[in-house]
Image (cartoon, rainbow, N blue to C red):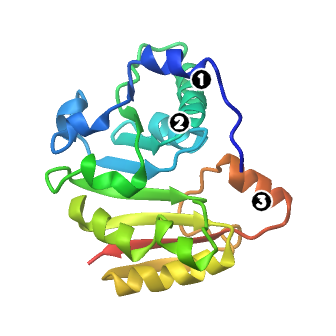
Amino acid sequence: MRIRRRPWAKQELEECEFYIDDPSVYKGKWNEYFSEKKPIHLELGCGKGSFIAKMAVKNHDINFIAADMIEAMLGLSKRNIEKEWLDKYIYHHNKLDNIALIRMNAERILDVFSENDIIDRIYINFCNPWPRGKHKKRRLTHPRQLEHYKVFLKDKGEIYFKTDDDDLFNESIEYFESSDFKILTKTYDLDKDLIFEDILTEHEIMFKEQGIKIKALIAQKI
């Protein structure tokens, strides 16, 4: 899908207090970035940021990191995070201090996180399915990526995965199991079997309107 350029994104991101253009500077010390030490959850491919915005507002006892590599998407995420926070706390004085928005290529994730960064949970929502054989290694659930996540995901830490793509879902189950992850629960219809609290993303709303069932699972690092 082609992403329309947002000319305003660069400047707004440069002025954003919770945006980090070079997150590698925090490698090994992400707990120092946040004002309070709390469990850290990471979303890979945050898109327009609606999911992470709602999660951060609803769960202030957790620190969130949202990652994407596309400037236009990061700009939209920044605006959606600020809007969600303003809508929730307009009559309060809560500071937006439990979220970091970072620019990162997931294939180079070990440039940004190390074994000293104990991540409790990873969210992968509607990632590119990369259906062609030679491109499958670029999937965010591919064993090559899972081995990277294991470096910084805590023992018994979890990956929450959602997709509309049947082939990606079925092959991802095999990926997790071959990479020493335990599938705690899974469903081929998240509407029918609500295996976790479902905060809808833009893609999920679109797929539901088209009658496409959402597949989901929770995988645990053994």
Secondary element at tag 2: helix
Q: Nearer the viewer, residue 84 or 70?
A: 70
Secondary element at tag 1: helix
What residue is disc 2 on? 53
- Residue drawn at (50%, 59%) of the image: 124
- Residue drawn at (47%, 64%) of the image: 140
Q: Nearer the viewer, residue 33 or 192?
A: 33
Residue type pointed to by label 1: Lys
Query: Looking at the rendered structure, which numbered label has been put on residue 34?
Result: none
In this view, the mark in front (1 or 3): 3
Find residue 222 and report its image quarter.
bottom left
| Residue 166 seen from this side | yes
For marks 2 and 3, give the CA distance: 20 Å
- Residue drawn at (22%, 63%) of the image: 151
In this view, the mark in front (2 or 3): 3
What residue is disc 1 on? 83
Which comes sooner in the sequence, label 2 or label 3?
A: 2
Q: Nearer the viewer, residue 65 or 98?
A: 65
Residue type pointed to by label 2: Ala
Query: Looking at the rendered structure, which numbered label has been put on residue 207?
Result: 3
| Residue 187 seen from this side | no
Bin the neighbour count of mark 3 within 10 Å (Cα to Cα): few under 14, some 14-19, many 20 and up.
some
